[in-house]
Every structure is written in structure tokens, then in C-alpha cells.
Image (cartoon, rainbow, N blue to C red):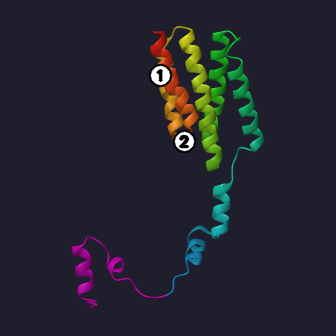
Amino acid sequence: MPSDFYKPIIAATFGTVTHAIFPVTGQRDGNAEIVAVSGMETLDIISRLQASDVDNATLDALRITTDRLCSEYPYLPGAQLAAEGRQWLKRVAGLQSQRLTLAQHREVLTLSGWLALLIGCVEYDMGDRGAAESTRKAALSLADESGNAEIAGWAHEMRAWFALTT
């Protein structure tokens, strides 16, 4: 072990501080340090991380609404379905500004992806090819972010359908 004279010189040579290379031996109390800095115990911090502003009933209602909109595709007028889909997409996207658990965040991204697919199909049916392709790409991005392979598959199928029918 180098002497106290050489420790700072060696540390400076490597662009760090002395204790990063030559730690002081002793006991650390990580919980005491967390409490001292934050005023909370580890369990309190984890509980706050897991807290959410959105309840499961809200997400259930959004799932049902998304399913209902998607099932109305065959018979609801395109303009009406596009308008409703965009309104619900804005509502679902608005949840992102609230505190969500990781599972809820993934669910919000998934619901947004389904709504984007629906809107993209309706845009294509209404003749707005450019908007449909942009919306399809957004849905694919949401699928990637949420890890939802089913949405990704539908987004790729839409591209194939666009190519087939053009």
C-alpha cells in the first residue's frame, strides 16, 4: 500500500479521487446513509416507487374501450371511428404524465399501440396513405417500446396490406 503522500498522486494520475482507488476500510451503514440523505427508509422509497396515480379499474375501462373501438371497425363510419380513436388515444397518452408503475406504463403503451393501429387502418381506408403510414410507424415504435410482439406483427401486416392494395 503506498504512503499517504503517494495515494493522491496515483489517484490524480488515473483521474479519480484517492478513496476510489484506496478505500478506507470500515463499516458502512447504507440504510443510515439513505435515511440521512432522504429522510426515508429503503422500504419507504420502494413503496413510493411502486405507487401509482392510476388505479387498475381505469386501465380495465381503457382496455374495454379500446377493444370496443377495434370491434366497431367493420361497421362504424371511418371519419367517426378515426375521431373517436384519436380522442381516446389522447386520453390514454395523457396517462403518461401521471405516476405509473412499470406494468401500468407498459399497458398504457400497449393500449396506445392498439389505438394507433386502428387509426392507421381507418386513415388508409379513407385514402390518407401518408397519415396511415406515419401512424403505422408510430404503432410499431410503441410495440417496440412496450415489448408487444402482437402489435408489431399487425404493424408489419399493415405495411404488407398497403403494398398489396396499392
Q: Which residues are magenta?
A: 1-26
What is the quadrant of the N terminus in the image? bottom left
* Residue lying at 51% horizontally and 40% vertically, measured from the top left: 145
Disc 2 vs disc 1: which is toward the camera? 2
* Residue lying at 40% horizontally and 86% vertically, measured from the top left: 24
How busy is the neighbourhood of tag 2: few (under 14 within 10 Å), some, or many (20 plus)?
some
| Residue 75 place in picture, x, y as percent | 71, 11
Q: Say whether residue 100 is magenta.
A: no
Q: Which residue is mark 1?
A: 134
Nearer to us in this view, 158 or 48: 158
How busy is the neighbourhood of tag 1: few (under 14 within 10 Å), some, or many (20 plus)?
few
| Residue 19 place in picture, x, y as percent | 36, 80
Q: Which residue is mark 2?
A: 147
| Residue 47 place in picture, x, y as percent | 68, 61
Query: Is 30 situated above or below 157?
Result: below
Task: Determine the CA span between mark 2 and mark 1.
Answer: 20 Å
| Residue 151 place in picture, x, y as percent | 57, 32
| Any part of residue 40 in sight | no
Q: Amino acid at mark 1?
A: Ser
What is the quadrant of the C terminus in the image? top left
Tell which circle, 2 or 1, labels the residue nearer the N-terminal end: 1
In screen coordinates, is 147 left or right of 16? right
